[in-house]
Amino acid sequence: MSYKGIFFAKKKNGSEYCRVSVTSKGKHISLGSFEILDEALKCRKEADEILLSENLTIDDYDNSYSLSFEKFVILINYRDNGIYIPNPIYLSTNLIYYYLDKDTVLKFDRDDLFYYSTHKICKRGNHLFCYEYGNQISINERYSIPAYAIIGKDYRFINNDIYDFRYSNIEIINRYHGVRKKIKDRKTVYEVKIHLNGYIKIGEFEDEITAAIAYNKAVDLLKKNNSKDFIQNYPELNAKEYAAIYSEIQLPDKLYT
């Protein structure tokens, strides 16, 4: 017996399972696989109801559905926006909503649609990342948040929503390793410290690029006599500009002892 949108297949061990799909507006959408026919039929019926309904929203999903939450979001978005996206994304006028689950929703600018429609976001603890050619790429890195950065200290989300990755909502406080912005005598200065059996203060500088290079110069000195693997900073300067600033920086005497 044949059923609309249900295709029977066999596993390597010979057991049978069902592949479920739906076709809407000429688009073939896979809904998943099921070992029990009744579950497959229920999933197919749910997909039809979503695509035909004007009232069902993402908030209506619950555990009674055979359809996965990810496929539920994909179908709701396809119904409302006419765009098939293979990841759990819902589009609004200016925003991308990426659903990790019903309670965890990431927000991105629409400019990022191509990337997130082709890259699946994974979550491990508080770490959000995508895979590119087998490598993990941190979501933070895409928004110029350094790997070592501490939220609230090195960067912050302006509206306090840690899942709102719109460019306008991310403020980088400290861009470079070992550099901390602070207010001293009502002026902004950049304090530089390096960790070697405790923190050693390198100095205070009027701009963060000079501060970042001062940290690098301290690293270069310490590497000669220490095997510690220090992080380097990479300010956007050409070699001549970098060398001119580097040569003017005076390191404290205690780094030489």
Image (cartoon, rainbow, N blue to C red):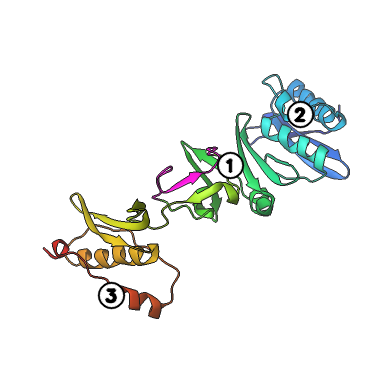
From the viewer's side, name the closer residue of 25 and 150: 150
Amino acid type shown at disc 2: Thr
Check disc 2: other Cα within 10 Å, few if <14, some if 14-19, many if 20+: some
Going by the image, does 112 lie left or right of 204?
A: right
Pointer 1 local density, CA inside 10 Å: few below 14, some 14–19, many at least 20: some
Instruction: Give the magenta range.
Output: 148-162
**Magenta-span inclusion, residue 155:** yes
Going by the image, does 76 lie left or right of 98?
A: right
Q: Position of residue 188 (x, y in %)?
A: 38, 56
Residue at point 42% right, 51% down?
147
> Which residue is labeled 1 in the image?
164
Residue wearing tag 3: 248
> At numbered mark 3, what does the secondary structure look like: helix, strand or loop?
helix
Q: Earlier in the sequence, mark 3 or mark 1?
A: 1
The amino acid marked with disc number 3 is Glu
The mark found on residue 77 in the picture is none
- Pointer 2 and pointer 3: residues touching (CB < 8 Å)? no
Residue at 26% x, 63% y is: 219
Identify the mark at residue 57; answer none if there is no mark. 2
